[in-house]
Image (tube, coloured by chain):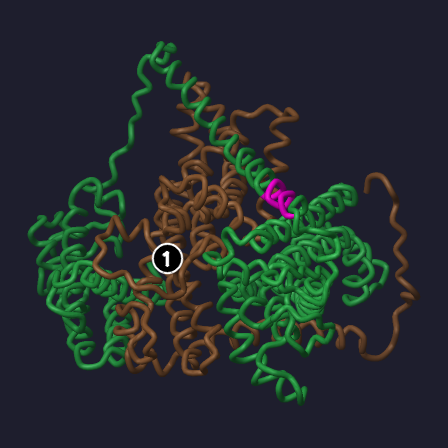
Chain colours: A green, B brown
Amino acid sequence: MPTLASRAWIAGIEVLLFLVLSLGFALAEYFVSGLFTDFGPSNFWLAFVVLAGWNAWHFAGSQTALGAAAGHYVLTLDGEPASVLTTAVRQLIRFGVLYGIPVLAIDFDLRVGLLVWLAVAVVIRSTPAHRAPWDLAAGTILASDIGPPQGLAPLPVVRDAGDLRLDPRRAKLDRRASRLMFLAGLTSVVISALIVWNIFTEAWTFVADDEFSWGILTDRGWFPRDGEFDLSTLFVGTLWITGIAMLVAGPVGLGVAFYLSEYASPRVRGMVKPLIETLASVPSVVLGLFAISFIAPEILQRIFDDIGIFSLLAAGIGVGILTVPIVASISEDAMRAVPMELREASYGLGGRKVTTALRVVFPAALSGISAAAIVGISRAIGETMVVFIAAGGNGVFNTDPVDQGQTITAAMASLGAGTDQVAGSGLAFQSLYFLGALLFVMTMLLNIVSDVIVRRFRQVY
Amino acid sequence: MAGTSTTVDLGDLRARRGADVRGQIFLVLLVASVILAFAMVGAVFYDVTLDAWDIISQRFWDFLRMPSSSDPTKAGVAQGIRGSLLIALIVVATFPIGIAGAIYLEEYADDTWSTRLIQVTVRNLAGVPSIVYGLLGLAVFVQSLRGLTGGSSVIAAGLTLAVLVLPVVVITSAEAVRAVPPSLREGAYGLGATQWEVIRTQVVPAALPGILTGTVLAVARALGEAAPLLVIGAAGFYTTGNLDFLEQTQGAFTALPMNIANFARLPAETWRGHAAAASVVLLVLVFIVNLVAIIARARISKKLGR
């Protein structure tokens, strides 16, 4: 018997499905103009008709073995399986109430309509089906609420194994499949070979170019179009961004990990963890926008007098927010992997919770936690869009975090943003690959180090 | 404990009188960091929605269906939505390669140096910054395969992002395949099935929920990536004119994250709202993708009776 919460949840999904459908019609209309009348409430009615039809069809189908397997049994009031026609009528009546009223309201006002819909859906779904007026009107009972009827039990599935001596056709298929899988496995190797080959040959043409001299790598700043490629400008920017990001993500991520692994009850954990994880699914462009529309004006400009909208500090905090879920989830995994016996031994010796967490769990999970930090650093170094949007770098050498700055990735993005001009203009284009090679080597080394740490120091409990 | 022995100094542990002040402070700090993390999530969604509110309340449908424009009252993200959907389609179309690769690693490969090489490569590829994939896309899909993709096109972008998410697909699918209990395989072998038949009828169906989760995460990631697109030359602003559908897939293109980056970098404050509204559209798209996965996963698990 479904609970009220699950009914409300299903109702919510239906509302969403309805909106998606409406949006789909709007999109279809946009691509094929004149397909439907015009964009507006009419699309809601289209979606309504489709949903109603689908629902009626779905439940009518439940009178077949397929629907029975899905657990829908619509019966007549006598308890006999209802005919397909009766079922369809029942669904249409039900739909008239469930969707018709809200769609009318939506035509009037979208927000009011959606609220009405949710309310109606929850009320309808929390009424026991065998007593619901719309069911009695249609002369049916939904039996999935009162258990499967005898006559309609799902048929047992019988698989005919047949003659299983290996015939040549099956053997051939088997060999072919294994070759195909091997090719797929090889793809990843081919891709990484391509990446390495591409980046390093192009980076080499940068170094081997006539205009190149090691002097241009230590110049006044990063101005690729003027032939000035000062790497220290980018390194300082990258260091600031990474440092600030880890100052944000380190303590917060570790705190969350400690809380989730040592203090939170399973219920609290089940609620907190998904919320933190939603942060991981926020695209980095959105965080970049957040940095210039919230972090810089609402927070930083109240603390520092002379800070602009664009600064390394704002970008670093943005990158830090992006890194929190990574640090939190890897460290939490490491802490949860510490066996209970260690904690119990500590308690047995009279250790308090805080002592156990800091002096037993923390040292035991240290390898995993440092791996988390390294993965976080590698992620922060490679993060592009936040810095590209929020650091506002102009290539001038700058060591002040409240000022604008440029990182390796943001410099690449700026070069890429003007690809049409960059392509073919000699060193500027090649410098893109030179930076790519640097970035590739740096993150690769960090990843290998974190791998080695985890392996070398993993204690086998 | 194997290997090294760890000395743990627990200090003087005779029962102390009085309140556990240190423990309380520690707990307060932990709760504070959890609240801070929540505040970050909340602030991001709140701020973006707030900034987008003007457009959402006044001309949201219009915003969804209008192409880019230099007039703030007319500009929309229709091209971006179209580009993002096409990219997602191409990425999804390449998933079988990743899943097959995972099946190879888990079901076929012996533990030799070449297998380990593939495993290490895949793990490291997952950690390569996304913008580096943009370089690969620029060199391979935009320049070398110009005939196929038509240069900086939505096809090149889709293939680049497909390569970007391939390691994620392989790693998560391999984990799902590894979690299938060996008894299932042994049962099928016992009935005389070939290896391919075991994989097709037992391993893949049982691993499907896990594979699905991984692939959906990959789609969500591909939807949100902007850096590689920037490098391979996605346009922030362009006009399509009267090109037909096929011509459009080979010409200039954009995607939602590119729209956002483009709006956000425009100097005038008036475009902030556009960036925020485009972010809302992107977040909703990512949310829908995740929701579809949750529902599909639940349905499959139910069907498998687990």
Where residue A273 appears, as percent x and y from the top left, is 56, 63
On the image, the x and y values in percent for residue B115 come to 60, 28
Three-letter amino acid code at the position of disc 1: Ser
- Does residue A119 appear to the left or right of B12 in the view shown? left
The N terminus of chain B, quarter of image: top right
Q: What element carries label 1?
A: helix
Can you say whether B127 is above or below A393 in the image? above
Q: Is any part of residue A259 visible from this angle?
A: no
Would residue A266 be counted in the magenta stretch?
no
Pointer 1 chain:
B
Q: Which range is magenta?
A: A199-206
Q: Where is residue B200, by image quadrant?
A: top left
Q: Which residue is drawn at 56% across and 50% down?
A: B132
Q: Where is residue A73 in the image (x, y as percent from the top left)?
A: 20, 50
> Would residue A201 be counted in the magenta stretch?
yes
- Give the dominant element type of the magenta stretch: helix, strand or loop: helix
Quarter of the view holding residue A177: top left
Q: Given the current orientation, which residue lies at the most extreme left position? A: A85
- Badge 1, how many Cα within 10 Å: few under 14, some, many 20+? many
Q: In this view, does B169 lie above or below A47?
A: above
Residue A84: x, y in percent? 9, 49
**What residue occupies the far front of the structure in this picture?**
A210
Depth check: A116 or A440 in front?
Answer: A440
Between residue A177 and residue A157, name the one nearer to us: A177
Vertical comparison of A238 with A116: above or below:
above
- B262 is higher (above) or lower (below) than B18: above
Res A12 → quadrant: bottom left
According to the picture, the residue beneath numbered tag 1 turns out to be: B84
Residue drawn at 72 percent across, 67 percent down: A220
Quadrant holding the C terminus of chain B:
top left
